[in-house]
Amino acid sequence: MGDEDWEAEITKPHVSSYVPVFEKDKYSSGANGDTFNRTSASSSEMEDGPSRKDHFMRSGFASGRSLGNRDAGQSNKRENTSIMGGFGSGKSFGNRGFSNNKFEEGDSSGFWKESNNDCEDNQTWSRGFSKRGDNEYDQDEGVQRTSGLFGSRRPAVSGAGHGDSYQCRSGSGSGRGGYKGLNEEVITGSGKNSWKSEAEGGESGDIQGPKVTYIPPPPPEDEDSIFAHYQTGINFDKYDTILVEVSGHDAPPAILTFEEANLCQTLNNNIAKAGYTKLTPVQKYSIPIILAGRDLMACAQTGSGKTAAFLLPILAHLMRDGITASRFKELQEPECIIVAPTRELINQIYLEARKFSFGTCVRAVVIYGGTQLGHSIRQIVQGCNVLCATPGRLMDIIGKEKIGLKQVKYLVLDEADRMLDMGFGPEMKKLISCPGMPSKEQRQTLLFSATFPEEIQRLAGEFLKTNYLFVAVGQVGGACRDVQQTVLQVGQYSKREKLVEILRSIGDERTMVFVETKKKADFIATFLCQEKISTTSIHGDREQREREQALGDFRCGKCPVLVATSVAARGLDIENVQHVINFDLPSTIDEYVHRIGRTGRCGNTGRAISFFDPESDNHLAQPLVKVLTDAQQDVPAWLEEIAFSTYVPGFSGSTRGNVFASVDTRKGKSTLNTASFSSSQTPNPVDDESWD
Ligand SMILES: Nc1ncnc2c1ncn2[C@@H]1O[C@H](COP(=O)(O)OP(=O)(O)OP(=O)(O)O)[C@@H](O)[C@H]1O
């Protein structure tokens, strides 16, 4: 098929899209014996010859209708998917095509503008988002997005009038645009409560998608699997030299060992079985603060053990207070709620909670979007002390009155800057004002992230008691120094060639390739499969089952390359990820820091390679130079030049605020120590330089 045909087809309005399934074993990739077949009948389109790429482009990205051989149910599902917010807008695909392995001229308004198209889509769903990559989170949950609550940097865009009426979710009549994420089950509640009906207006007032039936397989129950872990790396001990700053009044002293935390025996046993022998800095400082009942905002580099830093003291308190999860209680009232921005991350946090609470009376439960709501409810009614949830599903469950909030003593926001920004901030505000939710004076609120822009720190005040403590491990918003960062100048037309070159030289080492949009993730994964590089992909337009399968295949090494959007940028802790490649740089520097933090975790080393396209990435030059310099990485001369030429006076390090808030924005420093407890009240420059 010629490109003309492809373009003609894709520009048809309301053409359904098919998201290709990339898993190995499903595509035939030829010589090396890998068999990659597309799902069922469409595989024949894929197999060989020059037409293969065309087929991928045509049926893979454009039209469910061209999937004549697919079974009807699947085809239907895809159509629905696209209607529900998949990427099926013919408009979005206009002018896209390839020739001679390069984006065609038109591609600059295709792939390159793809993010803009996504933003357009996004604007209809999520008012006031300023970041390209935010789509991913936005897509992740079936929550209403609103503008203005935290102040939009961009004018809110009405969904109406875009011509994509099926994408508009402004059904509440309030001028707000809620939406249901892909394949979310639409929840219709009683509408008794004002906060609830507001959400419902957006969610139920419009198009309803197919009912979500996916029930995730239960995680393995055997002890070996529960406590499976990877080894800390050669740089684990170097964590001790990282500067730690604690701000706020009357901070309890840090602890040096797990024993000093005085946790109960079962918890100590579980910590030992998890392979933890030594505390990381964020744990040394956060555990005593949480045990002392203080609110906390903690910022520590990626992969440095923030999850255990909040889980262990919470579990210790729950056990001390004699909590018993009971399946016989009519209404489950969790004592702890943990929220995180993505499904995979919250699932990972749940597995950590399950590990540390193993053999105790505390029961952790996870609920997240893209899975059957009934399944979530069944998990909860069996007893729930620690509820790990994504925001949309949490609000659904609360709206359905399946949990009571009166007993909440701990509220944890992981990736807190993300949870409080314009995407999820409104949901979090709703959460804390839900009927029954104890006020901030009555509960302990804990915020954790590797990045904390100043503006978000200020917003966090609403969630925290005024005397909260702020722990900063190393440079706030800084990159992990165990990641060797390389920035290459690569124009968009050369990126694929460069990617293949790098992946071939890497061999089978586990690599995450980040791209900026869901469509591009599909495209690049497809392209790599064609190049016989075993690849899978994860992004917000894939069904939850596919996302979990992709992650599973990547984790076990079946597919050593995972092409991902920002949905996988934060929190994911996958063993042996040796490389992160930013095929596209993200729009903000904090997103960059999170992405490259998927490697170099827990004292292990890793490598990050970023393609810098001067056509589109110049705004990142300045913050990038700062991140590289702070992490003692080589800064290419050309990048310095671009940074210099695009110099912004009063540069704050981020396209959306000061990522490099070196201190607590309250500026009320009370202690300043290194993790090794130097008693100095001022930073020791030697320590600072030697912490890597
Ligand atoms: N004290 C410890 N000893 C050994 N391993 C640890 C310790 N603390 C955490 N880990 C392990 O380190 C890895 C990274 O931890 P975790 O995922 O909590 O990092 P994080 O700081 O939350 O990272 P991110 O910012 O990317 O979310 C996990 O595999 C965890 O089990």
Image (cartoon, rainbow, N blue to C red):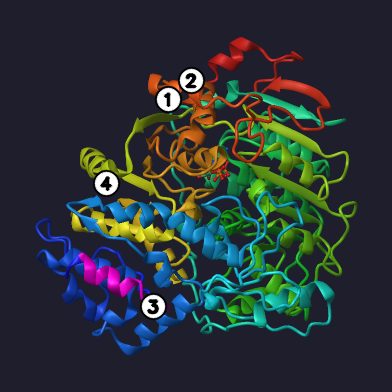
Q: Reading the chain from its start, which is encountered first: label 1 or label 2?
A: 2
- Taking depth in this image into account, of 52 and 403 the one nearest to the observer is 52
Q: Rounded to the nearest whole Å, what is the CA distance between mark 3 and mark 1?
A: 42 Å
Range of the magenta residues?
A: 3-14
The answer to whether residue 466 is visible is: yes
Main secondary structure type of the part rendered in magenta: helix
| Secondary element type, mark 1 | helix
Pointer 4: what residue?
Answer: 496
Q: Reading the chain from its start, which is encountered first: label 3 or label 4?
A: 3
- Label 4 packing within 10 angstroms: few (<14), some (14-19), many (20+): some
Toward the top, the furthest residue is 686
Q: Examine the rendered structure and indicate whether residue 513 appears above or below residue 546.
A: above
Pointer 2: what residue?
Answer: 632
Residue 49 quadrant: bottom left
Residue beneath the point at 48% across and 30% down: 621
The tag on residue 16 is 3
Q: Rounded to the nearest whole Å, what is the CA distance between mark 1 and mark 2?
A: 15 Å
Disc number lying in front (2 or 3): 3
